[in-house]
Image: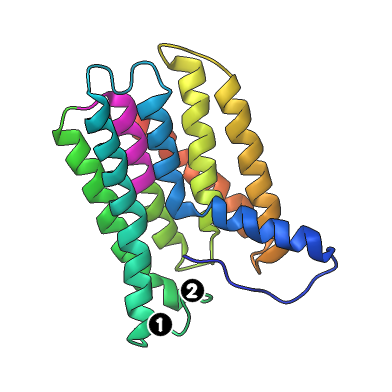
Amino acid sequence: MMNAPTAPNHQPAFIRVLAHVVSYVFHPLFIATYVMAFLAYLHPYAFAGIRELKKTFMVISVFFNTAFIPLFAVFIMWRLKLIDSPYLRTQKERIIPYSVAMICYFWAWYVFRNQGVSDTVQSFLLGSFLAVCLAWIANIYTRISMHTTAAGGAVVFFLLQALYGPDPTGYYFAIVLFIAGLTGTARLIVSDHTPAQIYLGFLAGGLCQVVALYFV
């Protein structure tokens, strides 16, 4: 779940450093928090009627469940030598951490669903949970990129908001699309993923957001 250092390629050192920065800033475990912060503070209706303090606690709750716990679990597994590296370089090393992430993402969706938040919030969290599940299954066959899985989910979520949301605008979608492209390019530069694994991540994340829209 963390970004593994890879062998040098033909890109200039500055480009590689920038690609590593992009990979960390837009780490897949942070995407849910970024989107939730957008829904809480910028979206006009997603958290309508909810006090600002409660919004903040909700964003923190999403960060705790979808980022902190999975990262902490990876750290513990690494220190206990259950995995060889916190960078999860192999498909085998990813099995247990992905399972932990599935539980955490499910819990985040389940809690918000029972709190009666808007369908917009529920749809995104459900799509994120489904994306982790699909990545876990895909990991049996190939080392799918989780960076682009998360980024692809965010792109399609914002596209659906632009098309069907109560306050449609393409500005945010364009920004997220640019970030997704930047993230995919960064992973091609500094990771050992194949282009197919990068593109598969985009497809998996986007598909799960479409599916989630019809189940909320």
Give the mark count: 2
On screen, residue 211 versus residue 12, left or right, reads: left
Report x, y in % for residue 170.
Answer: 58, 19
Residue 172 inside the magenta-drawn segment: no
Judged from this view, the residue extending furthest toward the left is: 114
Q: Is residue 196 visible?
A: no
Q: Crowding near pointer 2: few (<14 within 10 Å), some, many (20+)?
A: some
Q: Amino acid at mark 1?
A: Ile
Report x, y in % for residue 35.
Answer: 43, 36
Asked which secondary structure carries label 1, the reply is: loop
The main secondary structure of the magenta stretch is helix
Q: Residue at x 35, y 28 (%)?
A: 40
The C terminus, quarter of image: top left
| Mark seen at residue 192 | none
Region in magenta: 117-129
Residue 125 inside the magenta-drawn segment: yes
Marks 1 and 2 in Cβ contact (< 8 Å): yes
Q: Residue at x 54, y 42 (%)?
A: 152
Of the image marks 1 and 2, the number of the one nearer the N terminus:
1
| Mark seen at residue 88 | 2
- Name the residue tied to disc 1: 83
- Give above or below for 145 relative to 37: below
